[in-house]
Amino acid sequence: MFWRFLMRTGHPLASRYPDYEAFESFFTRPRGSLEDYLELHTLVEKVQALENIPYFVSKLIRGAWVFEGICYLELRHTPYLRTSPELDEHSRISQMRDVVRTIAEAGRDPQYPVFMRQIICLHSRLSYDVNRAMVNLAASEPNAVCGIDLAGPDVLYAARMSEWLDLFAYAKAQGLKTTAHLFETTAGADPRLLPYLDRIGHGIQIPLRYPEFLPDLAKRRQCLEICPTTYLKTGTLSSLAALQTVFSRCREYGIDIAICTDNAGLHNVRLPFEFENLLTQDVIDFKTLQACQEAAFRHAFAWPTGRKTPHQVLAEAIAPLI
């Protein structure tokens, strides 16, 4: 979808990759680190200007419904990075609301009735003022936004931890749901932010290297958002086999896991294939898969039927017909 957009608009990247196969190979090959992997996102963010957002979101919704059978989607992004870079900071902050509302409108399509809400990502490379403005934006758009996240290179977290603690405490006071890319790598292994989170983005280093934190996660009923293919693309793990420890230790402590895609476009792996890869490599069994799917809906920030999963909703609907 991204490559076709570049070709149609005559973007300079199109001349570098006139064949889709070469483009796909460049974008989906493994990177040496999380920071290198995140650099690919900047290419996409620069193209996804406000006027182009409807194209990308409408195609995303169609693909999620048709190819992945997704009925509920939390779309994460940093709205500031999709504003016009030629504007000053104050004007870009103001334009963030247009980004959020444009995404919300583009995501409404009766042909593909995916229930979509946005998670606004604070970013480790953006200023405190910009990040606080994104918290305020999230709180002021409850019909479009369901929570906040912390993203960007985790090597930058520690030096600014006092800011993140302040911002997440502020977000909780505003009634926002929270998650953060934390404990994905050892660089992001800082426990001070954990008490402020409803879910933990990745968090795999906790069961792998810091199991002493697992009892507190269980008490707080926090859920790990596991994105299997990401760890191979970033070099965080050499194989998916290491995730066996993650699943087994979380099961031991009664900690829920949701299996996610992170970024299917950069992986060339959609959600059903994340499931399949874990199953075929004996990382999980079908019972664990079902438990993770149910956990995903229990911990969803805006799923409209509460704790009921789609399976339960359908079962109740068809019961009188059986």
Image (cartoon, grey):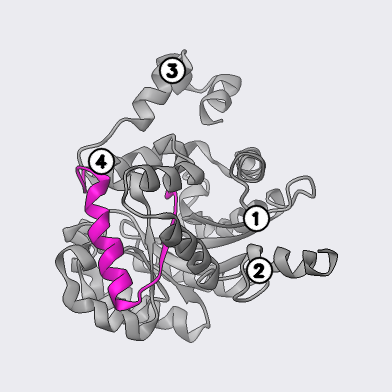
Judging from the image, what secondary structure is the residue with disc 1 in?
A: loop
Span highlighted in magenta in the image: 235-263
Q: Which mark is residue 71?
A: 1
Looking at the rendered image, the quarter that the N terminus falls into is top right
Q: Amino acid at mark 1?
A: Cys
* Mark in the foreground, 3 or 4: 3
> Relative to residue 9, is residue 83 depicted above or below?
below
Query: What separation in Å lies between label 2 and label 3 (alpha carbons)?
Result: 41 Å
Q: Amino acid at mark 2?
A: Gln
Residue 191 at what x, y percent from top left?
A: 22, 75
Q: Which mark is residue 36?
A: 4
* Mark in the foreground, 3 or 1: 1
> Relative to residue 132, is residue 53 depicted above or below?
above
Q: Is residue 113 left or right of residue 233?
A: right
Query: What separation in Å lies between label 3 and label 1 (alpha carbons)?
Result: 30 Å
Q: Which residue is mark 2?
A: 312
Which residue: 21% across, 62% down? 205
Front residue of 294/297: it is 294
Q: Residues within 10 Å of mark 1 (few under 14, many from 20)?
A: some
Q: Which mark is residue 21?
A: 3
Query: What separation in Å lies between label 4 and label 1 (alpha carbons)?
Result: 32 Å
Marks 2 & 3, CB-CB < 8 Å contact? no
Marks 1 & 2, CB-CB < 8 Å contact? no
Q: Residues within 10 Å of mark 3 (few under 14, many from 20)?
A: few
Q: Is 230 contained in the magenta span?
A: no
- The answer to which of marks 2 and 4 sits earlier in the sequence is 4
Residue 175 at what x, y percent from top left?
A: 53, 83
